[in-house]
Image (cartoon, rainbow, N blue to C red):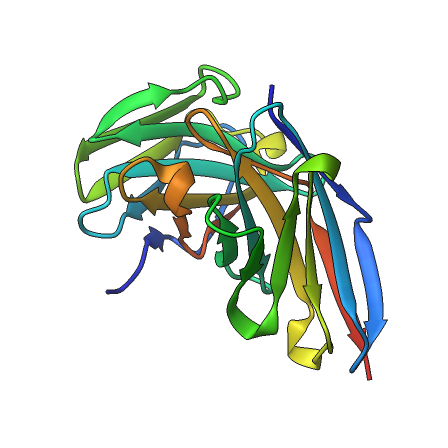
Amino acid sequence: DAGVIQSPRHEVTEMGQEVTLRCKPISGHDYLFWYRQTMMRGLELLIYFNNNVPIDDSGMPEDRFSAKMPNASFSTLKIQPSEPRDSAVYFCASSARTGFAYGYTFGSGTRLTVV
Amino acid sequence: AQSVTQLGSHVSVSEGALVLLRCNYSSSVPPYLFWYVQYPNQGLQLLLKYTSAATLVKGINGFEAEFKKSETSFHLTKPSAHMSDAAEYFCAAGSQGNLIFGKGTKLSVKP
């Protein structure tokens, strides 16, 4: 199994531009999570899906952020327009069944820099 | 709401010394508990997990953690540190839907 695959690994963009982060979960995993990691705030859950349906998006910072999961093998996190304070490492994770009981498998992350 | 506290954002030990990373959770109901490790520029990897089967949990790379309900703790230990253990370690708890992570503890290992 190739694990959770995220792309791109690094993204540098100018303020105001649209940014799209991509994630391919492990095949057969029902849950998909998007996290953001910063020095100041640590790991924050942004949103998670179960069977492609968004379950909890209360962690999405504001309307500039949106996430979709059109099918079981692909999810996107979009920021439009991007701002410097969005600079962080964004992780995608997936899990089988009730995720917290089984632990999550994380991708390698996307390091986003907004200048 | 569930919360996880990791005491010490940075711990430094000598190679061969005991590693002790502290984690306390807040919950009246024992949650599922996890330790993850993050090496530089990588994602988080699961070290071990507690799911009520046994209070002493053994994980990968010689790490283990003991669940103590009376202390609401789940400290991570390793008898003898190795240089390759240098990384950031995250404690996490899940009880009603998703995992809540602690702020992380960066472990440095001195030769």
In the rendered view, would you say A25 is above or below A53? below
Q: Quadrant of the N terminus of chain B?
A: top right
Q: Is residue A104 left or right of residue A14?
A: left
Tell me which residue sits at (40%, 40%) in the image: A101
Tell me which residue sits at (31%, 46%) in the image: A23
Q: Quadrant of the C terminus of chain B?
A: bottom right
Tell me which residue sits at (61%, 67%) in the image: B63
Percent position of residue A96, x then y: 27, 44
In the rendered view, would you say B73 is above or below B107? above
Any part of residue A115 in sight: no
Any part of residue A52 in sight: yes
Quarter where residue B37 is shown: bottom right
Q: Is residue B41 left or right of residue B82?
A: left
Q: Which residue in the rendered view is the most extreme toward the left? A: A71
Q: Is residue A88 left or right of residue A34?
A: right
Q: Is residue B22 left or right of residue B102?
A: right
Tell me which residue sits at (36%, 34%) in the image: A77
In the rendered view, would you say A91 is above or below A58? below
Percent position of residue B72, x then y: 69, 36
Percent position of residue A98, x then y: 32, 35
Percent position of residue B21, x then y: 74, 56
What is the count of numbered marks?
0
Q: Nearer the viewer, residue B54 or A86?
A: B54
Q: Nearer the viewer, residue A108 or A78?
A: A108
Quarter where residue B97 is shown: top left
